[in-house]
């Protein structure tokens, strides 16, 4: 039979008689034939590949987002190609160039920088959704959480328990998540009438080792904090490690609130109070935004802001010894 008939069967066309369609399918199975997606992409001028660039593939936060993205795209027979920038703008730039050169149909990425001035050309004509962080100088859709409100709720929870000397383990200051969570902490401190103390704010760079080092610095202060807010899950693990190494009791001697509710958070000793983010939903909503962008490329850029939730566990039980 003709190549046109075979092509129509592979494309799922209903213009082929059933007996011919079955013969083609039987031949495909017998030969073990796999369609050449590169060739099909050249003909269609598009691919079935979606690029996803995250800043730390080892962080379970992004693993959950990836699952949300994949569950949506699998139904559309779209494949997700994932890259890891390691919070490095140069690596991010390289990955973006490679993905775009491969003709990805769309792009979802967690920005590794705040300002994209001078890089606007990378995203021109491309359907793009930013996740977790809001980039400047590129007009793209985005899905984030209310980081200011989340960090403020974590700090206010400790203030309500009677803590007045509260440390903060900060993330990267050059991205919106780092900036907004610090802002939320400072707002809660100010509204409670507590003085800002720069010594109580230590950088952890969103890394487990960073959280460990930051917590040690807080513990070694002449007057250490009675409570700490850690602004991401990896830094929380490092902070708890530092506390346990010093044989300091949680929450009797120091209380701690983390950002992100990972599966292990409730299994720590004691279980960790957290600000939970809807990680799966971030990925799912980002994928849906991208699909809508494919259908309506001219609609204005949209920004979805999802809510966080305070989950109280034993790491912040009321401490009667707080002054």
Image (cartoon, rainbow, N blue to C red):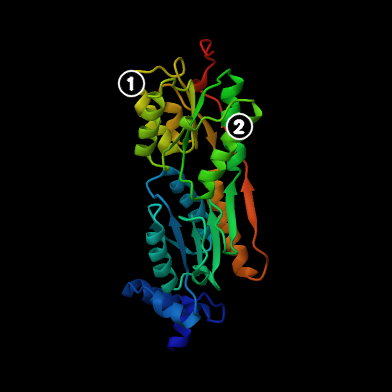
Q: Determine the secondary structure under disc 2.
A: helix
- Please give the count of numbered marks on the rendered protein: 2
Q: Position of residue 292 (x, y in %)?
A: 62, 64
Q: Nearer the viewer, residue 128 or 290?
A: 128
Q: Nearer the viewer, residue 243 or 313?
A: 243
Q: Position of residue 105 (x, y in %)?
A: 50, 70
Disc 1 crowd, CA 10 A, few/some/many (<14, 14-19, 20+)? few
Residue at 40% x, 76% y: name it: 38
Q: Which residue is mark 1?
A: 246
Quarter the C terminus occupies: top right
Q: Position of residue 166 (x, y in %)?
A: 52, 26
Q: Nearer the viewer, residue 200 or 16?
A: 200
Residue at 57% x, 34% y: name it: 185
Q: In the rendered view, would you say 200 is above or below 291?
A: above
Look at the image and tell me whether residue 290 can be seen.
yes
Q: Which residue is mark 2?
A: 153
Q: In the rendered view, would you say 83 is above or below 23?
A: above
Q: In the rendered view, would you say 303 is above or below 167?
A: below
Q: Residue furthest right?
A: 299
Q: Which mark is residue 209?
A: none
Q: Position of residue 40 (x, y in %)?
A: 44, 79
């Amino acid at each position: 039979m003709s190549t046109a008939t075979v092509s129509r069967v592979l494309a799922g066309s209903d213009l082929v008689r059933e007996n011919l369609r079955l013969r083609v399918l039987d031949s495909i199975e017998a030969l073990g034939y796999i369609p050449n997606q590169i060739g099909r992409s050249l003909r269609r001028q598009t691919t079935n590949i979606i690029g996803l660039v995250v800043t730390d593939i080892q962080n379970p936060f992004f693993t959950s987002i990836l699952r949300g993205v994949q569950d949506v795209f699998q139904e559309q027979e779209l494949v997700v190609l994932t890259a890891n920038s390691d919070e490095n703008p140069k690596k991010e730039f390289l990955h973006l160039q490679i993905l775009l050169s491969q003709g990805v149909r769309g792009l979802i990425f967690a920005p590794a920088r705040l300002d994209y001035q001078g890089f606007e050309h990378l995203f021109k004509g491309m359907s793009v959704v930013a996740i977790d962080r809001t980039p400047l100088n590129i007009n793209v859709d985005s899905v984030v959480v209310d980081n200011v409100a989340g960090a403020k709720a974590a700090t206010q929870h400790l203030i309500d328990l009677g803590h007045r000397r509260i440390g903060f383990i900060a993330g990267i200051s050059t991205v919106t998540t780092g900036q907004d969570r610090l802002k939320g902490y400072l707002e809660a401190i100010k509204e409670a009438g507590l003085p800002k103390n720069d010594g109580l704010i230590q950088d952890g760079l969103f890394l487990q080792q960073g959280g460990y080092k930051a917590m040690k610095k807080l513990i070694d202060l002449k007057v250490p904090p009675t409570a700490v807010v850690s602004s991401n899950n990896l830094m929380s693990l490092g902070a708890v490690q530092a506390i346990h190494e010093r044989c300091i009791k949680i929450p009797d001697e120091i209380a701690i609130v983390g950002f992100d509710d990972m599966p292990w958070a409730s299994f720590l000793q004691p279980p960790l109070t957290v600000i939970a983010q809807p990680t799966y939903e971030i990925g799912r909503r980002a994928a849906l935004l991208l699909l809508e962008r494919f259908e309506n490329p001219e609609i204005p850029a949209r920004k979805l802001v999802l809510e966080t939730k305070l989950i109280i566990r034993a790491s912040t039980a009321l401490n009667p010894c707080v002054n």
